[in-house]
Amino acid sequence: MNTPADAVRFAIGAVWAHEGIAWIRYDAGARFELQHVQPMRDAIRAVVPSGKALVLSDTTQLSGVSGEARATGNDPESVAIFGALAILGGSPLGRMVGNFFIRTSRPSYPTRIFTDVAAATAWLRTFEAA
């Protein structure tokens, strides 16, 4: 899916909602650092103002993620925002970053890594409220 014109931009990417899922797309070559965490959370809250968000994070263009940013993955604010997180990691580096995040942060919300958008969105939809 292309980034829509009404997406909420933050320093290294954009967030938008589509059919009940908050999509995050990072700029090519961006590195996710601690200073990007809160603006990304604010962007998610701008598109999903209440409740827990089902989030598809497209990490295919990221060049890396700092340990400090990764460490926020299971803090109280992240737990309050994320209902489930699908990490799209098309490259070996993207999959490695996602796996490392899951192992080190141990998020308390459902989190999986995917290489296919359709599979990621189908998995996220299993968490939609009935």
Image (spheres, helix red, strand yellow):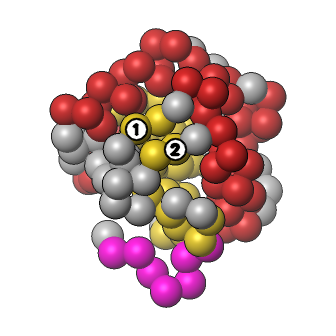
Left or right of 113? Residue 5 is right
Residue 62 position within the rendered picture, expressed as x and y whole percent measured from the top left = 37, 48
Query: Residue 89, how many percent across, how many down?
Result: 29, 41
24 sits to left or right of 81? left
The image quadrant where one finds the N terminus is bottom left
Label 2 crowd bin: few (<14), some (14–19), many (20+), radius 10 Å = many
Magenta span contains residue 64: no
- Disc 2 is placed on an element classified as strand
Q: Could one spot residue 88 in this view of the protein?
A: no
Inter-mark Cα distance, 1 to 2: 6 Å
Dot 1: element: strand
Instruction: Please provide the residue range marked out in magenta.
Output: 2-8
Label 1 sits on residue: 64
Instruction: Characterize the local packing of mark 1: few (<14), some (14-19) or many (20 or more) Cα atoms within 10 angstroms.
Output: some
Q: Which mark is residue 32?
A: 2
Amino acid type of the residue tagged 1 in the rendering: Gly
> Which quadrant would residue 27 be assigned to in this image?
bottom left
**In the foreground, 1 or 43:** 43
Does label 1 or label 2 sit earlier along the sequence?
2
Is the residue under label 2 in contact with that under label 1 (CB below 8 Å)? yes
User: Looking at the picture, does residue 63 appear above or below residue 97?
Assistant: below
Q: Is residue 3 magenta?
A: yes
Most frequent secondary structure within the magenta stretch: loop
Taking the image as drawn, is residue 26 in sight? yes
Residue 73, given in percent of the width and then of the height, sits at 62, 29
